Amino acid sequence: MRTSKFFSFILSFLVSWSAHAQTETVNVAAELPPIDLIWREGLHIDAGLGIHGGVYLAEGSAREYAMGLAIKTDVSYYLNDRWALETGSLIKFARVNELRIWGTEFGVGFRYRLPQGWYDEQVPYFRFFTGTSVNVVYTDGQKLPEFEEAYSRIQFEGPMVGIAFGGMRLTEKKNVWFWEVSATGEWMTRESGIQMDKDVPVVVARSALDGRSQLYTIYITMGGFIF
């Protein structure tokens, strides 16, 4: 019940935020938005907030589902009116079986501006990125069946790849807002057992995985350009 109320609040917040951005959008009912004011050459930083939902596929047939809050940041360099290079991160928070999970994906890739016209009030784009992911499971000393010992945290690492589709729009104050739907796949190749030593996390065990454990996640985020 508490989780349901949390996601209802997040969805209500995103809808309200989207409506606010739309009321500020430049009145261009008969014209397409000016690309040079939205897709601007040079260095830019954007940040957004949203939700995520994912499924963890362990070796064999075990599955776990998770939903929670997501935070997105990108540092992009727009080369011309079509292409941009970027690096960024996706941070997600979730709770599965009373275990708290904090996941971070770091990636580099490109952004491509799609042709205008499918929706007059925004500039659509496509993104591809790849990198690495780190997922930390906070067990608080609870011994999990999959492990021989009890750890305060268990960390999973591995490669990541993702794609995204979104749109950018201009407001009356010349601010750029965006919405984005992205999907990522992660392959776990290493796990580490961590114990706390006087509030300092110390890795006490580490082992390699064969990559047959994957995590697939879908993100829905909205935000704006910082500059």
Image (spheres, rainbow, N blue to C red):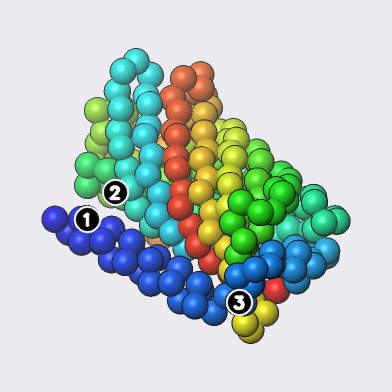
Depth order, front residue of 16/185: 16
Q: Is residue 104 above or below residue 49?
A: above
Give the alpha-carbon distance from disc 1 to disc 3, as whole Å. 39 Å
Give the alpha-carbon distance from disc 2 to disc 1, as whole Å. 9 Å
Q: Which residue is mark 2?
A: 95
Q: Is residue 196 visible?
A: no
Residue at horizontal 38%, vertical 39%? 54
Discs 1/3, front:
3
SS for dot 1: helix
**What amino acid is labelled 1 in the image?**
Thr
Q: Which residue is mark 1?
A: 3
For the C terminus, the image quarter is bottom right
For this orientation, the residue located farthest to the left is 1
Depth order, front residue of 184/151: 184
Number of marks present in the image shown = 3
**Mark before the other along the chain sequence, 2 or 1:** 1
How far across and down, in percent of the image, does residue 192 sit? Answer: 46, 36
**What amino acid is labelled 2 in the image?**
Arg
**Mark before the other along the chain sequence, 3 or 2:** 3
How far across and down, in percent of the image, does residue 91 sit? Answer: 49, 54
Residue at horizontal 60%, vertical 65%? 121
Q: Which residue is mark 3?
A: 27
Depth order, front residue of 148/108: 108
Do the numbered discs 3 and 2 sit on residues whose CB atoms are within 8 Å? no
Do the numbered discs 2 and 1 sit on residues whose CB atoms are within 8 Å? yes
For this orientation, the residue located farthest to the right is 80
Q: Residues within 10 Å of mark 1 (few under 14, many from 20)?
A: few
Q: Is residue 29 above or below residue 192?
A: below
SS for dot 2: strand
Residue at horizontal 82%, vertical 56%? 81
